[in-house]
Image (spheres, helix red, strand yellow):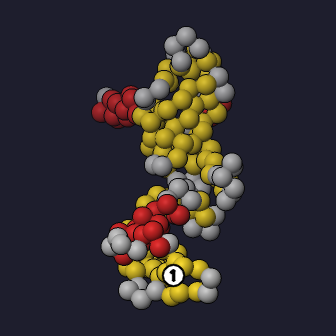
Amino acid sequence: MFKLVGMKDTIRIPPSEFGKPLKEVAVELLKSKYEGLLIPEVGLIVSILNVKVSEIGRIYPRDPSLHHEVEFDALVYIPLLHELVEGEVMIVEDIGVFVRIGPIDGFIHKSQIQDDYFTYDKKQATVVGLKSKRVLRKGDIVRARIVSISMSSQRSRGLRVALTMRQPFLGKIEWIREELRKLKKGTTGK
């Protein structure tokens, strides 16, 4: 889920930036500080918007920089448990697939693809259902449900999202359409 979060901070503008427009410098400093930052209570900051910077800065002893108070909106992505998401398969591996959902990748273990046993075909870079013969490859669009979220402000761990497609009307979009056609045919054929 995306949301806008109002935030406040104080930015430190070094003397090398004094000749530039204040708002332009403030936006640049805020973007470099916040964009891509994961704050566990807030989410992953995707973009900085609507920056308002105080015209009057403060000077502190032994610091040649100016310190200005700023207010801004942060576009934040925070996955919600049980949320339905759609995304593109980015990587297919022997243990499962990685799906791009917004600004992050979620992981679907091969046991969570469908009620079938999926095997990895290294040559084709696909996973294939043993009984159904359904194929999942890079570039496919899928619908999945978030089943687990792990957040850490440590850059090495970050945000991990586990997904499942083992529920009705989840999976590769073509599979869902196929199931809907079968249901429609079954109800109109009576």
Which type of secondary structure does the marked residue at label 1 adopt? strand
Residue at 57% x, 67% y is 42
Can you give x and y, in whole percent of width and height, for residue 33 in the image? 53, 64
Can you give x and y, in whole percent of width and height, for residue 124 in the image? 51, 13
Q: Quadrant of residue 129?
A: top right
Residue at 48% x, 45% y is 101
Residue 51 shows in this picture? no
Residue at 51% x, 81% y is 67
Q: Would you place residue 89 above or below residue 157 in this image?
A: above
Residue in the foreground of this view, choosing between 12 and 77: 12
Residue at 61% x, 64% y is 39
Kindly identify which residue carries mark 1.
67
Can you give x and y, in whole percent of width and height, for residue 27 in the image? 40, 68
Q: Would you place residue 50 above or below residue 186 in this image?
A: below
Amino acid beneath label 1: His
Residue 72 shows in this picture? yes
Q: Is residue 53 left or right of residue 36?
A: left
Name of the residue lying farthest toward the top: 123
How many numbered dots are placed on residues in this image? 1
Q: Quadrant of residue 60?
A: bottom right
Q: Residues within 10 Å of mark 1 (few under 14, many from 20)?
A: some
Residue in the foreground of this view, choosing between 5 and 58: 58
Can you give x and y, in whole percent of width and height, for residue 183 in the image? 39, 33
Q: Quadrant of the C terminus?
A: top left
Q: Would you place residue 152 above or below residue 21 in this image?
A: above
